[in-house]
Image (tube, rainbow, N blue to C red):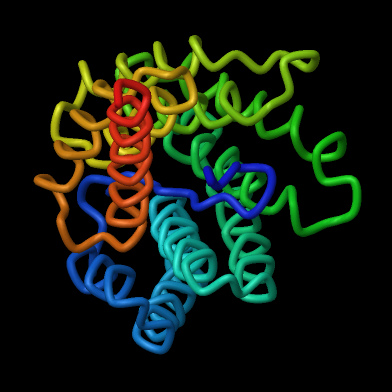
Amino acid sequence: MLLPLFASAVILPAVPQGQPDTRAAIAARNSNDVAALRRLISEAQEGAEREKTAHAYQTLAQLDLWLCEIGNTRNDNKLIKHAAEDAASAAEKAVALDSNSSEAHRLEGESLGQLIPHVFAGGPRLGPRSTRELDRAIELDPKNPNAYIARAYNYFFTPKSFGGDKQKAAEMLQKAIELDPNSDTAHVWLAQVDLALGRKQDALREIDTARQLDPGRPFTQYVYRQVADLDHNVASQTSGSHQ
């Protein structure tokens, strides 16, 4: 089963350039080490309060989003909600400090999307704002792959009657890959979109690429098993139909 953004989604933020403690944070995320990531978040919180710069708050928001990812792999809704609230708060401060920062708007849009299933009437309350932030991120920097990835989430998980479009989600992810071929996040989400569109071989190709780029990421391995199992089931059904 796919994990929708607006119902216990796993947000997979790409790595911002030049952020401190990136490798330690990724290691904590990939090992589901909540305590280690919380220590890094605490340090980032102190740094942001001391420096009061957009960059510092972006760092904090990114770490909180990775904590959301751990929460999703553990099915810990309380952890997801608190981390998403903190991420949104940090990203909002980053936007206030630098309204022309594409990444700040991207982080706020992603954080709000992560929060949607964990608050009352999250979709109508936060969905449009999340979309506006992500559109603004793309407008500010049309070469920001992170923004295209996040916007693809919205297209993919928003109901069609409210502007959702899986094909547009695929196009956004293809654009992100064009800008950054090494983004495992873009490849893993394109695998999910391809799977939903019935493009099984394309989904396998994309998830294999994501695994090569970051084999230790738990969610990537989850999607790989999902895609591979579905392909195996389809192959078995096809074989049976000819017996």
Left or right: 2 in relation to 177: right
> Residue at left 22%, top 45%?
17
Query: x%, y% of residue 87?
Result: 57, 59
Give x and y (percent) for residue 24: 21, 73
Of the 4 image quadrants, the one containing the C terminus is top left
Judge from the rendering whether residue 106 lies leftward or rightward of residue 173; answer left or right: right
At horizontal 44% and vertical 52% (from top left) the residue drawn is 58
Give the farthest residue toward the front.
Answer: 243
Q: Residue at point 65% right, 58% down?
A: 89
The quadrant where residue 60 appears? bottom left
Q: Nearer the viewer, residue 82 or 197?
A: 197
User: How many numbered discs, if any?
Assistant: 0
In the image, 143 versus 243, the foreground residue is 243
Q: Which residue in the rendered view is the most extreme toward the right?
A: 120
Compared with 55, 133 (above or below) is above
Measured along the vertical axis of the image, is residue 124 above or below residue 41?
above
Q: Spot the residue most to the left.
A: 212
Find residue 221 and report its horizontal and vertical position in percent.
Answer: 28, 56
Q: Residue at x 42, y 37 (%)?
A: 103
User: Does 112 sit left or right of 186 as displayed?
Assistant: right
Q: Is residue 215 left or right of residue 146?
A: left
